[in-house]
Image (tube, rainbow, N blue to C red):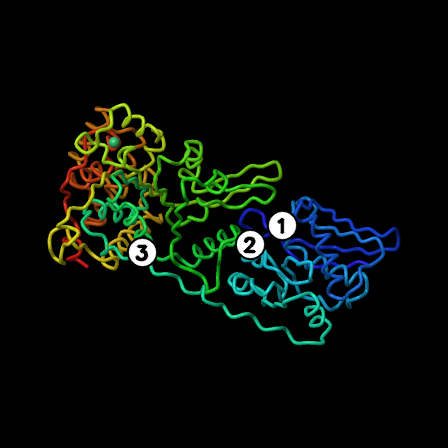
């Protein structure tokens, strides 16, 4: 007898529908799974057999053949276990064939017959077309975020079969639990001093520009970076779903408190492997940190400690907003449109890297700086050098110079206005503007053009850098309320925020910046 049961498998961060066909026939007892199962999927044989017998059903002493269709698609992971088990019971006549009508199944089976959650349940449930989908209790809230179908659950196979036979009602969902509450993003007002650092993260957030902060330990680089998500606008519903899909496929917690609209913030440690950063892995290709930071911030602290080969892998996502992972088993494309924020010390000794503050020989400082390749350095639109805050700044009272700065709420409002302007130009943020669009939305005045020409002739600005400086200048203009009319001041500030000699000996960034917050704030 033949049974067909709908289920799904994960390809990258997308779910693909799979039809599980189970055929039970007279003949030598055996159990075969065909249709491109990977290793973990082939192991379903052993889990399913144990789950069926330990749930009080009989394993058919016949020839059992399981076909996973479409046969050209590689099936990975244990998401098909439950469908295989129920298909076997139907094909063996232990469960009426009508019992599974309009239902799809997504769960791993324990040897004791318990239903276990599988990674990627959100995209998997979203791929199904049946009226209802049955998942493990721990998967219910996540599955419900995207499923077109009703979400049903049961704790173990025995209970589920009883329900399917009509002998019991569907068990209730578990409560979402404590994990539902997101911790608050820390406030920018807690950062003392650091006028330059604050402006840099404001410009970065407003324009989606990649940011490199160089400075000694204790300069507040990490403090600034962790406050960036609070400045960014909330994700749109589509973006939030895409982010949730990536998280789900990566096996991270999703959905207990509903869909999250907060831009992700990922801060992998420098000891992270290339696979965990970029994505990939063995048979099951998982999204990496660059994808988990999709539509959010990827923060690399101690940038120089990351192996060069790992950093080189960042080039593709930085240019294309996605990463293609090739393995013998499959080629998968993961989304990875993130803002790169990186921090490093000015010198190996942890000092500022300028002759006054560290006694390291010039060669040591050079070698340290050279760990960051030119092409990677070139991709940072904003490169600022920070210093430790002064004592009077640490104790600064509200209103005193350089002490307590604006809170996140005020800065986020300016960022939101700049992002709205970018949206009116047809992009999410100014960093995404193509060069032709720059001429339309941020035309250069004669003297601003001369200033940039001089930098190009001096060789302190590359052709790629030119477009980056123009995008940053447009963001600066947007933040100061100039709305697209680029003045010399905006270009000068963009150039200063992109110090070409950031890793050199001198401090090229001016210590005093034009302050736009008072002017732009007046118009708010
Ligand atoms: Zn040093």
- Give the x, y percent position of residue 490: 19, 41
Q: Are marks 2 and 1 in contact (CB under 8 Å)?
A: yes
Distance from label 2 to label 1 (Cα)? 10 Å
Q: Earlier in the sequence, mark 2 or mark 3?
A: 2
Relative to 510, is 342 on the left or the right? right
| Label 2 sits on residue | 120
| Label 1 sits on residue | 77
Q: Earlier in the sequence, mark 2 or mark 1?
A: 1
Q: Are marks 1 and 3 in contact (CB under 8 Å)?
A: no
Kindly state the secondary structure of the residue where label 3 is placed. helix
Q: Tell me which residue sits at (40%, 52%) in the image.
A: 264
Is the CB of mark 1 within 8 Å of ligand 1?
no
| Label 3 sits on residue | 230
Kindly state the secondary structure of the residue where label 1 is placed. loop
Relative to 28, is 142 on the left or the right? left
Distance from label 2 to label 3 (Cα)? 27 Å
Q: Quadrant of ligand 1?
A: top left
Q: Quadrant of the C terminus?
A: bottom left
Is the CB of mark 2 within 8 Å of ligand 1?
no
Q: Earlier in the sequence, mark 1 or mark 3?
A: 1
Q: Quadrant of the N terminus?
A: bottom right
Q: Tell me which residue sits at (40%, 37%) in the image.
A: 319
């Amino acid at each position: 007898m033949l049974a067909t049961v709908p289920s799904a498998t994960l390809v990258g961060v997308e779910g693909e529908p799979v039809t599980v066909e189970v055929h039970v026939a007279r003949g030598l007892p055996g159990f075969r799974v065909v249709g491109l199962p990977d290793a973990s999927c082939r192991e379903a044989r052993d889990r399913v057999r144990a789950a069926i017998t330990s749930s009080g059903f009989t394993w058919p002493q016949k020839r059992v053949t399981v076909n996973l269709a479409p046969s050209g698609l590689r099936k990975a992971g244990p998401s098909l276990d439950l469908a295989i088990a129920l298909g076997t019971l139907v094909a063996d006549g232990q469960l009426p064939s009508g019992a599974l009508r309009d239902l799809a199944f997504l769960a791993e089976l324990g040897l004791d017959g318990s239903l276990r959650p599988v990674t990627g349940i959100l995209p998997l449930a979203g791929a199904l077309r049946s009226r209802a989908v049955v998942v493990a209790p721990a998967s219910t809230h996540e599955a419900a975020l995207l499923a077109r179908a009703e979400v049903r659950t049961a704790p173990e196979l025995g209970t589920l079969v009883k329900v399917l036979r009509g002998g019991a009602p569907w068990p209730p969902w578990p409560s979402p639990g404590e994990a539902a509450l997101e911790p608050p993003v820390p406030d920018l007002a807690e950062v003392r001093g650091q006028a330059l650092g604050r402006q840099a993260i404001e410009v970065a957030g407003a324009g989606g520009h990649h940011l490199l902060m160089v400075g000694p330990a204790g300069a507040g680089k990490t403090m600034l970076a962790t406050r960036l998500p609070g400045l960014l606008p909330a994700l749109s519903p589509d973006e939030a779903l895409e982010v949730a899909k990536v998280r789900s496929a990566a096996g991270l917690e999703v959905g207990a408190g509903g869909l999250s609209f907060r831009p992700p913030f990922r801060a992998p440690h420098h000891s992270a492997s290339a696979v965990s950063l970029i994505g990939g892995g063995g048979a099951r290709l998982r999204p990496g940190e660059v994808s988990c930071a999709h539509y959010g911030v990827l923060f690399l602290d101690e940038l120089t400690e990351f192996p060069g080969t790992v950093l080189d892998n960042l080039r593709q996502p930085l240019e294309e907003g996605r990463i293609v992972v090739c393995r013998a088993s499959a080629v998968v494309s993961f989304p990875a449109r993130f803002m790169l924020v990186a921090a490093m010390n000015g010198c190996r000794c942890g000092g500022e890297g300028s002759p006054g503050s560290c006694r390291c020989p010039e060669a040591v400082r050079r070698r340290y700086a050279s760990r960051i390749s030119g092409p990677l350095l070139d991709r940072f639109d904003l490169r600022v050098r920070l210093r430790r805050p002064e004592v009077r700044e640490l104790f600064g009272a509200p209103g005193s110079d350089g002490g307590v700065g604006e809170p996140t709420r005020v800065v986020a409002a300016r960022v939101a206005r700049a992002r709205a302007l970018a949206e009116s130009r047809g992009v999410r943020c100014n960093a995404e503007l193509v060069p032709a669009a720059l001429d339309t939305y941020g035309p250069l005045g004669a003297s601003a053009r001369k200033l940039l020409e001089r930098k190009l002739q001096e060789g302190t600005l590359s052709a790629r850098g030119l477009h980056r400086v123009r995008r940053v200048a447009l963001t600066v203009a947007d933040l100061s309320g100039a709305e697209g009319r680029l003045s010399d001041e905006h270009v000068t500030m963009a150039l200063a925020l992109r110090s070409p000699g950031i890793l050199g000996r001198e401090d090229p960034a001016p210590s005093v910046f034009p302050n736009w917050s008072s002017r732009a704030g007046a118009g708010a």
